[in-house]
Image (tube, rainbow, N blue to C red):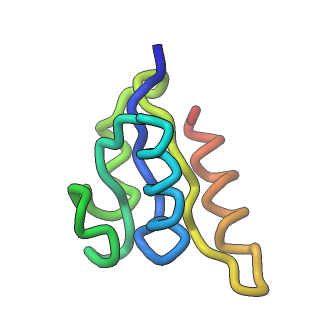
């Protein structure tokens, strides 16, 4: 059984990944971002601090933070959430 997904990042890359997940019939619980934007078809869960209430192992995260020429933000989020157990 596939776990439900939370998308990290609500910009353009998040919209693309949301569509790809839907085409694969994945259940998307919502998205996190610094502000409510972009993914208006999904519930906005707040910033990444909303993940503190999500039990590790009951959700999959999709890192949708864009990287126009600079991967540091995406990499930082990947490592921070990985250290949290995701």
Would you say 19 lies left or right of 45 here? right
Q: Position of residue 70 (x, y in %)?
A: 76, 82
Q: Position of residue 77 (x, y in %)?
A: 61, 60
**In the image, residue 16 above or below residue 21:** below
**In the image, residue 9 above or below residue 81:** below
**In the image, residue 19 above or below residue 70:** above
| Rendering quarter of residue 19 | bottom left
**In the image, residue 66 above or below residue 28:** below
Would you say 46 lies left or right of 24 here? left
- Comparing 75 with 13, the one in front is 13
| Rendering quarter of residue 10 | bottom left
Going 44% across and 53% down the picture, which residue do you hit? 7
- Comparing 63 with 15, the one in front is 15
Q: Position of residue 1 (x, y in %)?
A: 46, 13
Going 44% across and 67% down the picture, which residue do you hit? 15
Q: Position of residue 84 (x, y in %)?
A: 56, 39
Determine the residue located farthest toward the bottom in the rendered image. Answer: 69
Going 37% across and 74% down the picture, which residue do you hit? 34
Going 47% across and 21% down the picture, which residue do you hit? 2
Rendered-image quadrant of the C terminus: top right
């Amino acid at each position: 059984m596939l776990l439900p997904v939370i998308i990290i990042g609500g910009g353009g890359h998040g919209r693309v990944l949301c569509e790809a997940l839907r085409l694969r019939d994945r259940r998307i619980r919502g998205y996190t971002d610094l502000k409510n934007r972009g993914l208006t078809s999904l519930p906005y869960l707040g910033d990444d601090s909303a993940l503190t209430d999500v039990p590790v192992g009951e959700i999959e995260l999709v890192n949708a933070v864009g990287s126009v020429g600079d991967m540091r933000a995406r990499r930082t989020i990947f490592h921070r959430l990985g250290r949290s157990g995701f």
